[in-house]
Image (cartoon, helix red, strand yellow):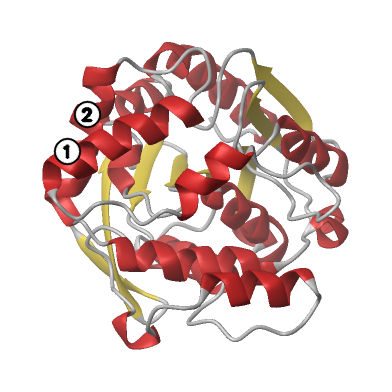
């Protein structure tokens, strides 16, 4: 797969579709690689007339790793952030939004539709107000505003999120099945599909250290709600009704904060993007893109 130099780092990426079509940048979530966005899903988007770009965030997959940043004490970062104290972390979500914008620069793309899932939804929001001139439309999926007044994750989901993943392959796959079944609501992919996707990520680039630094970036970023009113791009918020990690209130808060934003709630979807919802999500993204005259 190709690599690009962007924002001072190496970014691994690949593309689907005709580069003459409107670009759609897909941003992955916490600790996830670009293969979170399944090839078949990307091809469905390309068939709708997009030039689809997926990439590995910093500290994930085959993009630059920030080993010199060490392993942050997540409990301390979270405690300080919740008390409104300044927190020193290896990098921020702003840096990650600048990475994504730098990738557009490297590819010679002036403007793109921007879609992100979970942590990627937060990065999508940040691009919406930090790099307004580069955005055609925004599609944050299963994201939140960082508003501390919102409902917190389900305790079981939070516990699994912060537990270190097993390092041995078979144990990791079993852990992934357990985790994603809890996260995924009543319309999750079946166990074999989950195992296959987890194996793909493990074999491609198992690197749990990066997840900890990304989590520190999330916790330290604070409440974005006061600045989301700056977003001018047409915004479609997509959220599952059964998300235990980022409750639906996070999606509603995002839609309320962004001027003119629309909210699509997918019944039964949790914190994941199972194959059964792909057609609905793909159609919604394509319809939304038309509002910017970008597809």
Per the rendering, the mark at residue 135 is: none
Task: Check if mark 2's residue and mark 1's residue have beta carbons within 8 Å.
Answer: yes
Please tell me whether residue 241 is drawn above or below residue 110 in the rendered image. Answer: above
**Where does residue 182 sit, x and y in percent of width and height?**
47, 28
> Closer to the camera, 166 or 133?
166
The residue beneath circle 1 is 199
Give me the residue at 19% from left, 42% from top: 171
On the picture, is 229 further left or further right than 98? right
Residue displayed at 36% across by 45% down: 53
Find disc 2 in the rendering and name its residue: 195
Q: Is residue 44 left or right of residue 236?
A: left
Determine whether, in the image, residue 9 is placed left or right of residue 184: left
Between 232 and 181, the residue placed more toward the observer is 181
**Residue 277 appears at what percent x and percent y?**
48, 15
Q: Can see residue 25?
A: yes
Q: Residue at x 56, y 46 (%)?
A: 158
List x then y, in percent, for residue 67: 30, 81
- Element under disc 2: helix
Q: Is residue 112 visible?
A: no
How many numbered dots are placed on residues in this image? 2
Q: Dot 2 surroundings within 10 Å: few (below 14), some, or many (20 or more)?
A: many
Task: Name the secondary structure under disc 1.
Answer: helix
């Amino acid at each position: 797969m190709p690599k690009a130099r962007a924002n001072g780092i190496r970014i691994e990426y690949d593309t689907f579709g005709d580069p003459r079509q409107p670009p759609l940048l897909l941003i992955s979530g916490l600790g996830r690689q670009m293969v979170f966005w399944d090839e078949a899903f990307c091809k469905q988007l390309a068939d709708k007339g997009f030039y689809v770009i997926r990439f590995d965030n910093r500290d994930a997959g085959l993009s630059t790793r920030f080993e010199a940043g060490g392993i942050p004490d997540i409990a301390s970062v979270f405690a300080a952030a919740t008390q409104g104290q300044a927190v020193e972390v290896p990098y921020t979500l702003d840096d990650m939004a600048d990475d994504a914008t730098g990738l557009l620069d490297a590819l010679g793309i002036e403007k793109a539709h921007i879609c992100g899932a979970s942590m990627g939804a937060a990065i999508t929001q940040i691009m919406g107000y930090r790099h307004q001139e580069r955005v055609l439309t925004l599609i944050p999926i299963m994201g939140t505003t960082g508003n501390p007044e919102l409902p917190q994750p389900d305790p079981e989901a939070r516990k699994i999120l912060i537990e270190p993943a097993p390092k041995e392959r078979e144990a990791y796959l079993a852990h992934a099945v357990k985790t994603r079944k809890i996260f995924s609501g009543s319309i999750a992919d079946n166990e074999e599909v989950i195992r296959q996707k987890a194996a793909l990520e493990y074999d491609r680039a198992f690197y749990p250290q990066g997840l900890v630094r990304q989590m520190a970036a999330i916790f330290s970023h604070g409440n974005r709600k006061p600045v989301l009113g700056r977003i001018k791009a047409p915004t479609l918020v997509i959220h599952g009704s059964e998300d235990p990690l980022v409750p639906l209130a996070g999606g509603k808060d995002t839609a309320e904060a962004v001027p003119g934003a629309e909210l699509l709630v997918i019944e039964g979807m949790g914190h994941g993007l199972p194959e059964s919802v792909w057609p609905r999500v793909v159609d919604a993204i394509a319809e939304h893109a038309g509002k910017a005259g970008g597809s």
